[in-house]
Amino acid sequence: MAEDLLSLRVANDQAAFPRVAAELQAFGSRHGIPHRDLNRFNLALEEVLTNVISYGFPADGRHEIDIQIRYAGDTLQATVSDDGVPFDPLAQRAPDLGTAVEQRPVGGLGIHLVRELTEAIDYRRDGGHNVLTFRLRIGH
């Protein structure tokens, strides 16, 4: 199967979520990606975008987030790029899921969920941008 690419640019506003989900659904339908895999991928993407929007721009203002979704062979991959404050979510300690919720520090569950939903996740800082990439093998 040939590689296909979906490129989106959205504002740092959660109002973009329905558009991203609809575009991803159409993209997945075009390629016959199973609903279960597409839902997992969408949930991971939504968690990443939520973190970027909620914590990446402390000075507020309008910013753009670039999303590239690639499908090749049996792999679906998303790359999310933003010009927010430098932050490597992979450098953060994993949450202690054995501790009662009330006793845990806030944060860390979103990236933990992305790690659980996907096969691979990578972060790099490139030209003043945070670039997070994650992959999901379809049908596994």
Image (cartoon, grey):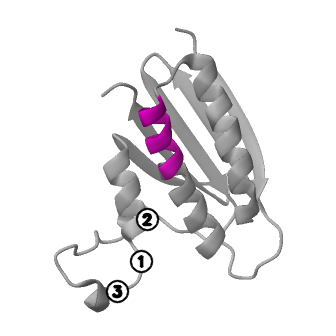
Q: Which residue is mark 1?
A: 107
State which quadrant residue 74 falls in.
top left
Looking at the image, the residue that sits furthest to the left is: 98
Question: What amino acid is at disc 2?
Answer: Gly
Percent coordinates x, y for residue 133 in the rendering: 50, 45
* Pointer 3 local density, CA inside 10 Å: few below 14, some 14–19, many at least 20: few
Instruction: Tell me if label 1 and label 3 are in contact, CB under 8 Å.
Output: yes
State which quadrant residue 37 falls in.
top left
Q: Is residue 37 magenta?
A: yes
Q: Is residue 3 left or right of residue 88?
A: right
Q: Which mark is residue 110?
A: 2
In 3D space, how far apart are the residues under numbered discs 1 and 3 (Cα atoms)? 6 Å
Q: Which residue is mark 3?
A: 105
Percent coordinates x, y for residue 59 in the rendering: 75, 82
In 3D space, how far apart are the residues under numbered discs 2 and 3 (Cα atoms)? 13 Å
Percent coordinates x, y for residue 27 in the rendering: 64, 27
Q: Secondary structure at mark 3?
A: loop
State which region is magenta. 35-43
